[in-house]
Image: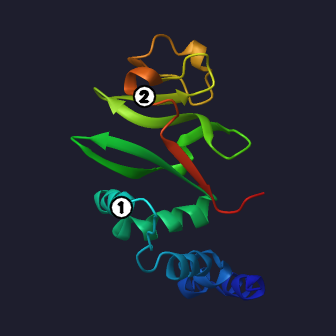
């Protein structure tokens, strides 16, 4: 739409910074989703006593009202939103996982996550490394493992060496992986 105007200004040697935002509707699209989806507090209803209070506490500990707009922006930009359930010091909350760090995942036919691989760039003692976190419920014994390595995110797990942490899901006290994917659009 604005290509002819941009070319004319280029040939005339005029730099017009104001034309740049007009070339893409992404900011307006993302802003729309934040303005329409991330407003207000969710209504929690349950027939079981205490469930609504528990869910409200989890949302409070997750700082949901503050992080919800940022998470919706990420979902609109990247297409998916991944969350991880965390339990620490008697509190339970969920936190968003950076979508670009999720390099592989599988789901069952119901949409429940069955495995996930997260590769995050880190620096250890001045050396750039990759931290790979892998969770699976598909193996005979579900487990989670963490590696820190110099390889890239495409390296198969069996080539990463011994993990620095390994726990079976049973020892953690669960029989599922504590992640959920919220797709922007179901295909």
Q: Residues within 10 Å of mark 2 (few under 14, many from 20)?
A: some
Q: How many marks?
A: 2
Residue at point 63%, 25% (across, down): 138
* Of residues 128 and 137, the one drawn nearer to the viewer in this rendering: 137
* Colour setting: rainbow
Query: In this rendering, would 41 be left or right of 32?
Result: left
**Does residue 78 appear in the picture of this structure?**
yes
In this picture, is 164 found above or below 100? above
* Residue at x 62% of width, y 74% of height: 26
**From what the image shows, is residue 60 above or below residue 88?**
below
| The one of 52 and 81 positioned closer to us in this rendering | 52
Dot placed on the residue nearer the N-terminal end, 1 or 2: 1
Q: Say which residue appears at 63% left-offset and 36% top-offset.
A: 104
Which quadrant: the C terminus? bottom right
Marking on residue 129: 2
Residue 146 showing in the rendered view = no
Residue 106 in the image: x percent, y percent? 67, 37
Instruction: Locate residue 123 relative to residue 154 in the image: left or right.
Output: left
Is the residue 93 above or below the residue 16 in the image?
A: above
Query: On residue 59, which mark appears?
Result: 1
- In front here: 152 or 109? 109
Residue 132 location, x and y as percent?
48, 29
**Residue 144 in the image: x percent, y percent?**
47, 25
Q: Nearer the viewer, residue 175 or 23?
A: 175
Quarter of image, res 88: top left
Residue 142, numbered label: none
Q: Secondary structure at mark 1?
A: helix
Of the 4 image quadrants, the one containing the N terminus is bottom right
């Amino acid at each position: 739409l604005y290509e002819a105007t941009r070319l004319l200004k280029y040939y005339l040697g005029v730099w017009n910074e104001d034309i740049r935002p007009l070339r893409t509707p992404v900011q307006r699209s993302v802003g729309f989703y934040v303005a329409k989806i991330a407003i207000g507090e969710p209504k929690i209803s349950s027939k079981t006593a205490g469930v609504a209070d528990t869910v409200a506490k989890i949302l409070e500990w997750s700082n949901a009202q503050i992080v919800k707009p940022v998470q919706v922006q990420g979902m609109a930009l990247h297409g998916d939103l991944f969350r991880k359930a965390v339990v620490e010091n008697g509190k339970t909350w969920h936190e968003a996982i950076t979508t670009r760090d999720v390099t592989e995942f599988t789901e069952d036919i119901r949409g429940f996550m069955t495995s996930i691989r997260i590769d995050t760039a880190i620096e250890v003692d001045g050396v750039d490394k990759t931290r790979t976190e892998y969770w699976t419920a598909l193996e005979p014994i579900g487990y989670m493992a963490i590696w820190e390595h110099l390889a890239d995110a495409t390296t198969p797990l069996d080539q990463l060496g011994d993990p620095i942490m390994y726990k079976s899901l049973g020892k953690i006290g669960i029989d599922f992986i504590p992640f959920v994917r919220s797709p922007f659009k179901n295909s």
